[in-house]
Image (cartoon, rainbow, N blue to C red):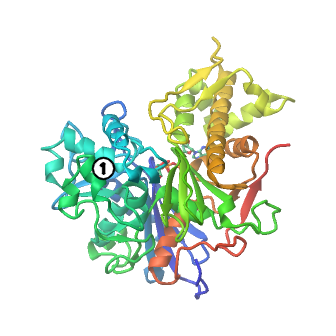
Amino acid sequence: MPGGDQEPGRYYVGVDVGTGSVRAALVDQRGTLLAFADQAINKWEPQFNHHEQSSEDIWAACCIVTKKVVQGINLNQIRGLGFDATCSLVVLDKQFRPLPVNHEGDSHRNIIMWLDHRAVSQVHRINNTKHSVLQYVGGVMSVEMQAPKLLWLKENLRETCWDKAGHFFDLPDFLSWKATGVTARSLCSLVCKWTYSAEKGWDDSFWKMIGLEDFVSDNYSKIGNQVLPPGASLGNGLTPEAARDLGLPAGIAVAASLIDAHAGGLGVIGTDVRGHGLACEGQPVTSRLAVICGTSSCHMGISKDPIFVPGVWGPYFSAMVPGFWLNEGGQSVTGKLIDHLVQGHAAFPELQAKATARCQSIYAYLNSHLDLIKKAQPLGFLTVDLHVWPDFHGNRSPLADLTLKGMVTGLKLSQDLDDLAILYLATVQAIAFGTRFIIEAMEAAGHSISTLFLCGGLSKNPLFVQMHADITGMPVVLSQEVESVLVGAAILGACASGDFTSVQVCEEPGVGRGNSPVCHGPSS
Ligand SMILES: Nc1ncnc2c1ncn2[C@@H]1O[C@H](COP(=O)(O)OP(=O)(O)O)[C@@H](O)[C@H]1O
Ligand SMILES: O=C(CO)[C@H](O)[C@H](O)COP(=O)(O)O
């Protein structure tokens, strides 16, 4: 982010919409977080594999958290606002009102979430076309991307949704529209989830081939025909109406957005690591892999030239770091899988009671319980007989197979707290092996990765971090600023304000943003 030597007292607001909650932060010019707030958001699962949200609920949560983080601040010092969000599909009618994405006709639920797997038949047909755009999503389109979901809406909700629809937004672009009234889309969302090419634009033949020729005939007005790089300033900035909603001054700069994983990647990949003896010190930024671990995990690796990795999304040009190609590996459920297995275990009520009695989170309690039961042996040995295959929601990368299911082997009749703790450990290990599997695929295709940079909710779990270091054999770097995704969102606002000339991380790490790291090496 070159150009950052301004006088003190200029602030930026970053808003991060994750799967389970909305977070906001007030950030200064050095990227230091001054205030933080979060707010849970509603999710609906009306049928198995159908996951929905409400754009009105999400906007309301953005307003609550933004108002909280600017409390007590001179609003004139706030210079810019940036959003990131999950890559969920928002549907609005021609007057920008929510439309139902469900058979119940509930228009409040107008978002098909990223993890929704309803469009299985549609994605198979799309993949059977073998269209050349598929080369840029790892060779296989994911059911979690937007094209299959759009086709599902056309085939299943023609009258109630499809025919009335005026605007289909990726959630990050919905938020920037809501703040500014500008319908321009971010290059990040269109390239990563909608098959747009940064170099060639839309490919008419793809949309015609899959049966969505409607978009071609109206010049893509419903899905975006004005595309801006992340961090570009939108229109005249914050509208008076949005300013009232958010408690911010009208007219402040609002940036073209990023998908949440990409904001996290931007927030950590340029971390200054000098003096920690890490393999990536003095090496190109392409030797770093950002891993954003929340409900899902996303593995973001960049390169100067395009690298085609079977089963790993991309290569996407300029979708995260301007001028670099991005490959994005991923595991569709990681935090959600750990929560699912722990909360579904017979010993969960006992765990909750014991953690509450000690004023600890359930994960802090489980981690200390594992330390107790491992006694003198290495932690990894506790799971010699218990193994988890973590693809409970299919495999995003590198197998790119949505039909895969999860598996646990080595179960016994006992279901006490020790069993729960060991199942939790085996799950964390399985997720870390998934990361190793993705790195191996990326390296086989030409990446050369030496260091992991983790952020997201799961990076607050020391066991998760240590298992990633042990199982990949690579050092794991955590930024001192734990809310790195929010730093990424605020960088967008800082760039849009004109106070900084670019969101670009420096090509040579060591002269990048100051965000002192905490490093975890593999256990000896
Ligand atoms: N302090 C913590 N210790 C262990 N796990 C945590 C901690 N904080 C969050 N998590 C886990 O991280 C996941 C959510 O991460 P988050 O980044 O908030 O997700 P999202 O962006 O998808 O909303 C959950 O599975 C949660 O259990
Ligand atoms: O597909 C993705 C990014 O390309 C993410 O997995 C999706 O946006 C959900 O993110 P999170 O796990 O942080 O809620």
Residue at (86%, 43%) from the top-left corner? 524
Image quadrant where residue 158 sits: top left
Q: Is residue 57 left or right of residue 508?
A: left
Location of residue 303 in the rendering, given as x and y in whole percent from the top left corner: 60, 62
Location of residue 521 in the rendering, given as x and y in whole percent from the top left corner: 79, 50
Q: Is residue 109 visible?
A: no
Image quadrant where residue 197 sits: bottom left
Q: Is residue 422 left or right of residue 483?
A: right
Asked if disc 1 is less than 8 Å from ligand 1, the answer is no
Please tell me how crowded label 1 is: few (under 14), some (14-19), or many (20+) other residues with Cα within 10 Å. Answer: many
Residue at (39%, 79%) from the top-left corner? 252
Location of residue 256 in the rendering, given as x and y in whole percent from the top left corner: 40, 70
**197 w.r.t. 146: above or below:** below
Residue at the farthest bottom position: 7
Element class at badge 1: loop
**153 w.r.t. 246: above or below:** above
Frontmost residue, 476 versus 98: 476
Frontmost residue, 251 versus 51: 51
**318 w.r.t. 518: above or below:** below
Location of residue 313 in the rendering, given as x and y in whole percent from the top left corner: 49, 50
Q: Which part of the image, by quadrant, shows the N terminus?
A: bottom right
Residue at the farthest top position: 413
Q: Amino acid at mark 1?
A: Ser
Frontmost residue, 49 versus 461: 49
Q: Is residue 399 visible?
A: yes
**68 w.r.t. 29: above or below:** above
Residue at (51%, 36%) from the top-left corner? 395
What residue would you read off at disc 1? Answer: 54
Image quadrant where residue 130 sits: top left
